[in-house]
Image: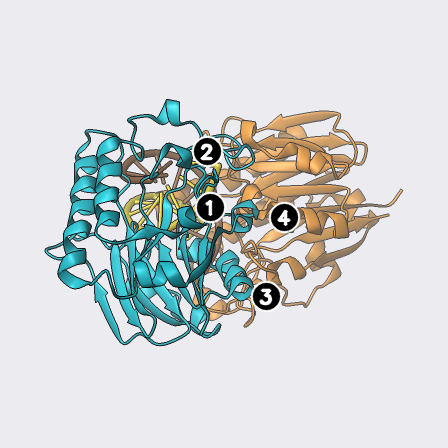
Chain colours: A orange, B cyan, C brown, D yellow
DNA sequence: GATTCCCCGG
DNA sequence: CCGGGGAATC
């Protein structure tokens, strides 16, 4: 049976609620992975999503970070956080459905290369790489998705020369992402669009960044072999970024047969 | 020639802009006196009002207070502040039109009876009372309007027993307002509606205050004899308080022949 | 530029 | 409850 999954860094679920609900009604993904919900669990607007027929799973904290999974079908199992730990930050939420496990990540942004936050980012990516073989099997259906805060290649940034060696484009970050993929995950968007310069994030601070398409592709849907095979489409839905009061990110959607 | 004047404590011009523009289009007062604009002069959204055919006069400060006068006709003279002074707070703006002077006041709220801010409120009212005979003639057309933060009588509060002696209902505040009126000003709403319990302000903090009509009449239009005579209507326009994202106040409108 | 929280003031 | 402002983060 066909199904679809989306990832969307909403930059505040509460601030994004009207836009997000409209988008869910239209796009109707079976599973939606949200990042940067920026809300404590007791304040998560669960009923708004339940009204649209979604089960809601969320792992938040005050002010920052926060991840959620919305799903039309109920999860058989849910897991929060990373082993051995993710520094008390709400950045990882996984849920098991009939279609397999879905791991939703909000990878640290890292501030600047060399900054303490950047070392934490590399450590975080490394912990993801270590967690995968411990908990999963690359032969089984698995999605690892979210805001990776890494542009996998120079095709994935608007100005690779200017960004070379900078945060999100640094070789150490790319190597860390490649180690995650090397275990047995493929970047679905890139599988289906090997040449496309298509972004998922446009910085608010860059004037007219979206209009001028000065962006980054850092929101990824990675999948193990069975789901790579089953995936018949993976696209960036650029519309929500163009609406009023947008997130700085836009959703990525994958469809499976 | 017939004309109309309105007073409206907007509680933030910028936050109230859509509602305010809609209301101005509908009600189309020739003169609108705004209080609590809460904006510095360089950030006053003048063009939005100019697009509706208003001249704009404003006297603001950062964060608090702030008064403005919008007028379909140009002012011949404009004066800010009180003599000898109003403590550096932007609470007074006067403008002279062909129809006479209009003095727009945002009287201090006073926090609590006995509080330093309350003494400042009494002092402010006293300064208004002293300024009137110094600058104006009660035989000439003059409007003194705005948020007086005083309910003139027990008819002007939802629960006079509970409010007796409290801020906005204290005898000293009422006496100060009466001294202002005694010089030669009449409360136009009360002239036209001697018995009506009609409010202009409903506190956000009281649950359902507007729905349950738990309010105060503290926004007044006072006029000298020639304009009392010319006034054929004075009403509270209750509609804006019922809309989405309302101010805690609603406009009062007077019409003159 | 746009979140969030926390403070002040009504 | 809601406005504005300031700090921190991305």
Work out whether mark 3 precedes mark 4 in sequence or the reverse, and give the earlier one. 4
Label 3 packing within 10 angstroms: few (<14), some (14-19), many (20+): some
| Left or right, A104 with reference to B119 | right
- Badge 3 and badge 4 in a common chain: yes
Q: Locate the N terminus of chain A by quadrant.
A: top right
Q: Secondary structure at mark 3?
A: helix
Give the quarter of the image for residue B136: bottom left
Disc 3 from disc 2: Cα separation: 35 Å
Instruction: Where is residue B54? Give x, y as percent.
Output: 42, 72
Q: Pointer 2 indicates a residue of which chain? A: A
Q: State if disc 2 and disc 3 touch (CB < 8 Å).
A: no
The CA distance from mark 1 to mark 3 is 73 Å
Q: What percent of the width, then of the height, locates residue A93? A: 61, 33
Q: Which residue is mark 1?
A: B193
Q: Residue at x 29, y 58 (%)?
A: B224
Is A64 or A255 nearer to us in this picture?
A64
- Which is in the foreground here, disc 4 or disc 2? 4
Tell me the number on the disc at residue A62. 2
Question: Mark 4 against mark 1, which lies toward the viewer?
Answer: 1
Q: Do the dots labelled 1 and 2 sit on one chain?
A: no
Task: Name the residue at 77% across, 34% down.
Answer: A100
**Mark on residue A18?**
4
Secondary structure of residue under mark 1: loop
Q: Examine the image and state in which quarter residue B84 appears.
A: bottom left
- From the image, state whether disc 1 or disc 3 is nearer to you: 1
């Amino acid at each position: 049976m066909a199904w679809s999954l989306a990832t969307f860094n909403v930059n505040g679920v509460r601030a994004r609620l009207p836009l997000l609900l409209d988008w869910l009604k239209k796009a109707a993904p079976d599973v939606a992975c949200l990042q940067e919900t920026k809300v404590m669990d007791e304040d998560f607007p669960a009923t708004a999503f339940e009204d649209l027929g979604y089960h809601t799973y969320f792992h938040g904290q005050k002010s920052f970070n926060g991840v959620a999974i919305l799903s039309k079908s109920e999860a058989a199992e849910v897991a929060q956080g990373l082993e051995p730990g993710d520094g008390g930050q709400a950045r990882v939420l996984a849920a098991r459905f009939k279609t397999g496990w879905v791991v939703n990540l909000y990878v640290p942004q890292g501030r600047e290369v060399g900054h303490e936050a950047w070392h934490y980012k590399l450590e975080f990516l490394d912990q993801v790489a270590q967690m995968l073989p411990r908990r999963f099997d690359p032969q089984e259906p698995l999605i690892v998705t979210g805001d990776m805060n890494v542009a996998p290649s120079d095709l994935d940034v608007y100005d690779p020369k200017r960004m070379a060696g900078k945060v999100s484009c640094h070789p150490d970050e790319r190597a860390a992402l490649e180690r995650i993929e090397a275990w047995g995950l493929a970047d679905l968007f890139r599988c289906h669009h090997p040449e496309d310069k298509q972004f998922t994030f446009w910085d608010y601070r860059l004037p007219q960044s979206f209009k001028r398409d000065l962006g980054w592709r850092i929101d990824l849907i990675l999948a193990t072999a069975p789901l790579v095979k089953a995936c018949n489409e993976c696209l960036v839905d650029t519309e929500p970024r163009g609406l009023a009061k947008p997130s700085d990110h836009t959703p990525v959607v994958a469809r499976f047969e």
